[in-house]
Amino acid sequence: MMKRWGILPCNGLDKPAGQLAREIALYLAQDQAKTLACPVFLHSAPSVYAKVKEETQWLVLDGCNTRCASKLAAEAGFAVGKKINVSELTEKENLKLGRSLRLEPEALALAKRSALDLAAALFTARTDREEKTAAIPDGKGQTDSGVDFPASITYTEFRQDKFRFRVPQGEFFFNENDCWVWVQGQRARVGVSDYVQQSLSDIIFFSAPELGAEVEQFGVLGSLESSKAVFEVIAPVAGKVVAVNEELEGSPERVNENPYEQGWIAEVELTDWETDRELLLDAGQYLEYLKNKVADFHV
C-alpha cells in the first residue's frame, strides 16, 4: 500500500527563502489536509512523529543549499518522496527575494502556484498510482517488471585499502559513469555499480525517471542522493522508460544493500542496442577500468 504524504518545511524563518518554504507548506497542509511536521519538535522530540513517520511519505521543502530540512529528514529516518529547494525555485522563476521577512505579493503568489502544482503532481498522481498498483499481486507497490532477471548472480571481487568492490559476471555492460545495463530482447534493466553506492555512502533519496520518458544514451535517468553528494544516473542505453523500481522511493537504502539486484533503478525499451553496445564495457573490461579508477582516486 502506498504511504500518505506529509510535509517537512525548512525552519529558517529568519531568512526570506525559509519564509517562502513555510508559505508553501501552509498552503499544502491547509488545502490538502496533509500532515505538517514541525522541524523544532522533530529535532528536540522526535518521538512525537514516531508513529506517523511509519505510514507517511514526506515532501521536504529546503530553503537553500544548506538543505537543513533534508538533513533533518535523514536523521529522523523519514521516507522522503520528493524534495524541493525553494532557492532553486525562485531562480527558475526569476524572482529575487528581498531582505524583508514579510514576503512581497510576487513571492506569495509563487508560494500558492507552487503549492497547487505540487498538489497536482504528487497528491493527485499518487491517488491514481494507488488505484493502479492495488491490483499488483505481489503487493510490493513496484511497477511490474518485464525483464526475466537472473535469480542469482556471481560476482568478482577485489579490494582497495579497506574497501571491497563487486562486479557481476555474465551479460552485464557498463558505461564509464559507473552505471550498468542487463539486456533481454528489446528490454533492459539499468542500475548503478557497487562503486557508486560505496562512494555515496548512505543513500537517503531516490528521484525516479518518469514512466514513458524517452532517454538518450548518456542522458540522465533519475538520481540518487546521500548526505555527501547527488549522483545522476547516466543511461547506458537509449530508449523509453517502461518501469521504475518504486521500492526505492520508500527504501533508497536498497541500493546500498545491493545495487545489482534489489537496488536496480529502471527498465528501458531499447531503441538501438547494437549501436549503444559499441560504447559500453563488458563486465571484464569494467573490472579493469574500476581497478584503475579506485587506485587513482582512493574512494
Image (tube, rainbow, N blue to C red):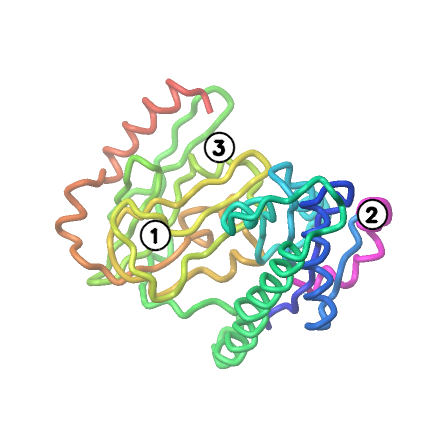
Q: Is residue 64 rendered magenta in the image?
A: no
- Labelled disc at residue 190: 1
Disc 2 to disc 3, how far (Cα)?
A: 31 Å
Residue count near mark 2 (Cα–Cα under 10 Å), binned few <14, some 14–19, many ≥20: few
**What residue span does the magenta drawing correspond to?**
40-57
Q: CA distance from mark 1 to mark 2?
A: 40 Å
Q: Is residue 146 above or below residue 102?
A: below
Callout 3 amino acid? Ser
Kindly check if marks 2 and 3 are in contact, taking CB atoms under 8 A apart as contact. no
Residue 199: mark: 3
The x and y percentages for residue 56 are: 68, 64
Badge 2 or badge 3: first in the primary sequence: 2
Identified at 46% across, 51% down, the residue is 263
Q: For marks 3 and 1, give the CA distance.
A: 18 Å
Looking at the image, which is closer to me, 122 or 75? Answer: 122
Circle 3 SS class? helix
Q: Earlier in the sequence, mark 1 or mark 2?
A: 2
The residue tagged 2 is 40
Nearer-the-camera pick, 190 or 12: 12
User: Position of 44 compared to 25: left or right?
Assistant: right
| Front position among marks 1 and 2 | 2
Closer to the eye: label 2 or 3: 2
Q: Amino acid at mark 2?
A: Val
In depth, the one of 122 and 181 nearer the eye is 122
Tell me the residue at 43%/22% (across/down).
160
Is residue 54 inside the magenta stretch?
Answer: yes
Residue 153 drawn above or below residue 7: above
Q: Position of residue 272 (x, y in %)?
A: 16, 56
Mark 2 falls on what kind of element? Answer: helix
Residue 166 image position (x, y, % from top left): 40, 36
